Amino acid sequence: MFANRTEWSLGQNQIALLLEKLQTSGISILDLTESNPTKCQFVYPQKEILAALTHPKNLEYHPHSFGLPEARQAVCHYYQKKGLYVDPSDVILTSSTSEGYSFLFQLLANVDDVVLSPRPSYPLFSFLGDLHNTQLHPYDFFYRDAWHLDQEGLRETLEEVPNIKAMVMVNPNNPTGSFIKPDELKVINDLAQRYSFALISDEVFLDYSLDGKSTASMSLIANHANLTFVLSGLSKILGLPQMKLSWIVVNGPTEIKKAALQRLEVIADTYLSVNTPVQNATKEWMQLAPALQGQILQRVQANWKFLKEDFAKTRQSQLLHTEGGWYAMISLSQNTGEEELTLRLLRDAHVLVHPGYFFDCLEGANIILSLLPPQEVFQEGINRLLQKI
């Protein structure tokens, strides 16, 4: 009765089953995987956020394929403050970054065409590939004091795998926190021109540099060399995932960019998914970015600092260097299994972490932590974790 593309493994894993059992028993869990900012005790300006949803124009419907002009202009202003120019006509509003990916997979890939996706990375891509009958093929990053693109492996993949239509970059990556370096981007651009594939850069975490340095130069917004799509949205920029507004910014050589925008207009017009109140509120909400981002950035930087100080005292595991985003990776000793440790931490210490295989980590055994939890929760969780490893 159901499509083959939905033949996923739908049962709960051992970690989820144990978590449910403990929570049902009333046991309090220190959740070091929490990445929902609305559940992390940040102070939101409720009056301003809610007042922006009361605009009288919300009672009118003016369908625009790419989104309301004022909302798209607000997106452009966000980049302008970073010193990056974006034309409103190159912005397509979507209801989520996932929907942005959906539009781009529909635009670029025929049935069984290939999209390259990073490894390690967030497990969203496999489901998007399934839903669009698109084959995902990994390209790898390796860790040697920092994360590096496996350039030789990428070249081999491009030689061996036919029908590659796009390459997804998460910039900075989730969970490695690594940005695409200028020398790596040069290689990627050269290969994209040689093998004729588009670039998709997911930059939802761009504003969260753990060392406080500007990340504007890391963005692919100004990447004119190849057809390039940059994704971002309010979920991370403002810590407002419930408001469901994201976007695609299109760049590249003039003719191919024009053709892409024409086709995306049809795709976007077919859905018209972004609701009017959110679009009308976007300009006012964007003005709250400094205060909201300031809280989040202060939290992730403080938790990262605590992690570095605590892991400097142990030789049983290694805290991997990260540059940006909301996550941290810990490499475990060779005789420690990541799922075994994750279950032991949850069962004995009541601390929840992600095992590395959730993110397709290939090198060694790893666990993944969110840097968003309140500092007292995070520090107690890390103290318990260190006692177990």
Image (spheres, helix red, strand yellow):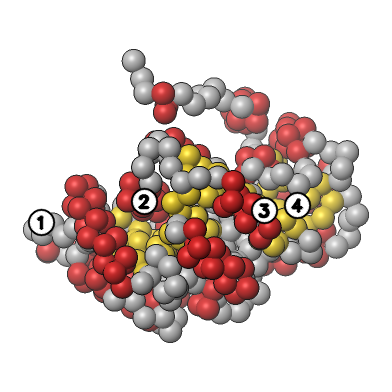
What residue do we see at 43% from left, 84% from top?
Answer: 83
Location of mark 1 (residue):
61
Q: Residue furthest right?
A: 315
Q: Secondary structure at mark 1?
A: loop
Q: Secondary structure at mark 2?
A: helix
In the rendered structure, which amino acid carries the disc numbered 1?
Tyr
Q: CA distance from mark 1 to mark 4?
A: 49 Å
Q: CA distance from mark 3 to mark 1?
A: 50 Å
What residue do we see at 89% from left, 60% from top?
Answer: 313
Between disc 1 and disc 2, the foreground one is: 2
First in residue order: circle 2 vs circle 3: 2
User: Is residue 307 or residue 337 the one in the foreground?
Assistant: 337
Location of mark 4 (residue):
330
| For residue 283, above or below residue 327 | below
Position of 356 compared to 23: left or right?
A: right
Mark 2, other Cα within 10 Å: few <14 / some 14–19 / many ≥20? some
Q: CA distance from mark 4 to mark 2?
A: 36 Å
Residue 108: which numbered mark, if any? 2
In the rendered structure, which amino acid carries the disc numbered 2?
Leu
**Percent x, y of residue 27:** 65, 33
Position of 314 compared to 363: left or right?
A: right
First in residue order: circle 1 vs circle 4: 1
Q: Residue furthest left?
A: 60
First in residue order: circle 1 vs circle 2: 1
Q: CA distance from mark 4 to mark 3?
A: 24 Å
Between disc 3 and disc 1, the foreground one is: 3
